[in-house]
């Protein structure tokens, strides 16, 4: 059953472009590594000035600048390069919104490696047992995650805190604190908030050699009586049963009328929109049992764990959404 | 000198999407490897039917199908998947225009590996001396190239033959014959054409152990008196001086009023358009001295080699162009 004849002549362009899409990732990472965007922001616009500033060959600089122009990160006029508005905000190292460090995690050997045996992973339905190492709590990739992804998490953390921190005395537990930004945002918005962090030990206590002895979110004592428990980007790492187990602990640790807040990549029920949330499933397929859960799946987990009701809120323009669940 | 304030709020989406663009390449390759498109073309539309046909887990199949829907290779309606018109033509293994094999070359360890140390390659201005191996004539990647890329070359080879083969007796030399498709297309269009092929020996004579003893395009005797010499996708591998040396040989081998025809990725003088031709420079940067040359650069090479005049012709809709040069 092939579809009816296309309105325009078939073109192999999409096949060719997609098989070479990895070059875009590689080129952007090179621009970040060479600090090309900062070099241009500093006032270097000609090929020779940029090449000399980033200590690279003129040919290599020319090819990289042209490629980054084509894929939307630079503008080229009369042989001179300048930053696009987005590059100026997010890729100039001196910008407060600099996102260059995210490349260290998103294109790390560990994260990209999750998809290396993708054909076998699809057959199996998740990471092969021999590849489970990177998901272990003690793996250094989680330290890199905490360090590198913080800038990207700042915006949603601010949005969530602005919505929920209020000004009254508040006890907040931040599970999977990692970068700590959600808890920090709450403390900043509400000086009366008392914030506690829980995470895999090597992320919270990078330097401590005995970190392994401490507990993780699954076996550490949460305490009790919290008004808000934050569960940012945590549920997508595990299967439903594991998540429900954690959520029962969260439920028990909340005080009366407490709420749980879970920022997550949440595809619509069609699982193909919004694109960024839905595409996250592929990244999670590379883990042993993770997934990008739909709202109905998440709602069911919270309900099974004892929560009275849940709702989903948008985090626009950030490509994530919130599940807010009421004890 | 940062650009003026953007018309709309800055968004990190382009950074995030580009750093993850490699997932698109990986997912398409997985779909091709699992023969997912053929499975759907055969009439398997539900998740369970597709998963069973490709012998993969339902979860893995679901994630892959959704991802391929989002990036434009499948359509999803009521939980059932079907092929897009382009996928039906180019990714169903039973289609005469099947392009799946191109993944074997475009995403091979050797080709992707050319950009692995991209930051160093940009600094250096080409492949590091330690990485020159893949460009050696005897490297098996060229055999893979000849086998895998043939389907993609068929369309431009047909276009070129239709334009230049005519019907009169014709002596054609096909340099860099590789897949042989340009010469074959001439022979098919014109039964009076006598076609000779020249290429790196292991591509033409894969099985012969003593292939190394034979000559390459640079030292083999071309003969003389040709009406047409085809130089498809050859000049971009070398620096200008090497290309001029080859073109002088080509000039000498042409008979009176003979022509040389070079299908190439040819960026406009701005080097950022058309995108596919211009982006090819990045792939070539990974080689020791290759490049995607502009028409003015190619025209100068042909002129220096003794050609009287050149012109550029479009190969639309194929993303390449032709330099035609007259003795």
Image (spheres, coloured by chain):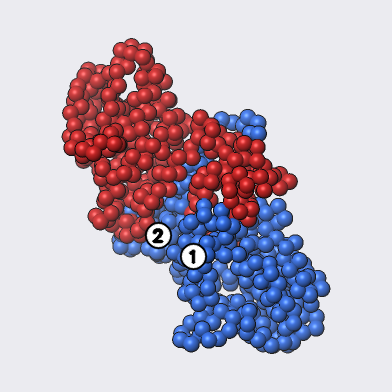
Chain colours: A blue, B red
Residue B46 at x, y percent in the picture: 68, 45
The chain ID associated with circle 2 is: A
| Residue A85 x, y percent position in the rendering | 52, 58
Name the residue tied to disc 2. Answer: A30
Examine the rendered structure and indicate whether residue A3 appears above or below residue B4. Answer: above
State the separation of the CA atoms marked 1 and 2.
31 Å
Mark 1 surroundings within 10 Å by alpha-carbon count, few (fewer than 14), some (14 through 19), many (20 or more): few
User: In the displayed structure, does residue B195 sit left or right of residue B314?
Assistant: left
Residue A130 versus residue B197: which sits nearer the camera? A130
Residue at the limit of the structure toward the right, as seen here = A308
Q: Secondary structure at mark 1?
A: helix
The label number, if any, that marks residue A174 in the structure image: none
Q: Quadrant of the N terminus of chain A?
A: top right
Q: Picture coordinates of residue A149 (x, y %)?
A: 53, 70
**Residue indicated by mark 1:** A130
Which quadrant of the figure contains the C terminus of chain A?
bottom right
Residue at 36 percent of width and 32 percent of height: B179
Q: Say left or right for A20 vs A322.
A: left
Q: Earlier in the sequence, mark 1 or mark 2?
A: 2
């Amino acid at each position: 059953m092939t579809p009816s004849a296309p309105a325009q002549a078939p073109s192999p362009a999409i096949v060719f472009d997609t098989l070479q899409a990895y070059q875009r990732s590689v080129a952007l990472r090179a621009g970040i590594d060479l600090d090309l965007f900062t070099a241009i922001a500093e006032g270097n616009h000609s090929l020779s000035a940029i090449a000399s500033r980033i200590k690279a060959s003129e040919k290599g600089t020319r090819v990289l600048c042209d490629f980054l122009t084509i894929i939307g990160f630079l503008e080229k006029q009369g042989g001179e390069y300048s930053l696009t508005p987005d590059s100026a905000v997010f890729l100039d190292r001196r910008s407060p919104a600099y996102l260059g460090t995210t490349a260290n995690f998103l294109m790390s050997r560990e994260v990209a490696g999750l998809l290396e045996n993708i054909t076998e992973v699809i057959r199996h339905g998740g990471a092969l047992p021999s590849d489970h190492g990177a998901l272990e709590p003690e793996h250094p990739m989680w330290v890199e995650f905490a360090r590198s992804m913080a800038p990207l998490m700042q915006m949603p953390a601010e949005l969530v805190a602005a919505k929920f921190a209020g000004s009254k005395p508040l006890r907040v537990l931040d599970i999977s604190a990692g970068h700590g930004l959600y808890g920090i945002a709450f403390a900043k918005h509400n000086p009366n908030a008392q914030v506690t962090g829980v995470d895999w030990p090597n992320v919270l206590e990078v330097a401590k050699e005995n970190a392994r002895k401490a507990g993780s979110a699954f076996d550490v004592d949460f305490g009790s009586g919290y008004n808000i428990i934050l569960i940012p980007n945590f549920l997508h790492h595990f299967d439903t049963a594991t998540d429900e187990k954690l959520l029962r602990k969260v439920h028990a640790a909340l005080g009366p009328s407490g709420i749980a807040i879970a920022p997550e990549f949440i595809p619509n029920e069609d699982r193909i929109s919004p694109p960024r949330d839905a595409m996250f499933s592929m990244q999670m397929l590379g883990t042993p049992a993770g997934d990008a859960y739909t709202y109905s799946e998440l709602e069911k987990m919270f309900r099974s764990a004892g929560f009275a009701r849940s709702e989903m809120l948008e985090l626009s323009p950030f490509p994530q959404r919130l599940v807010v669940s009421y004890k």
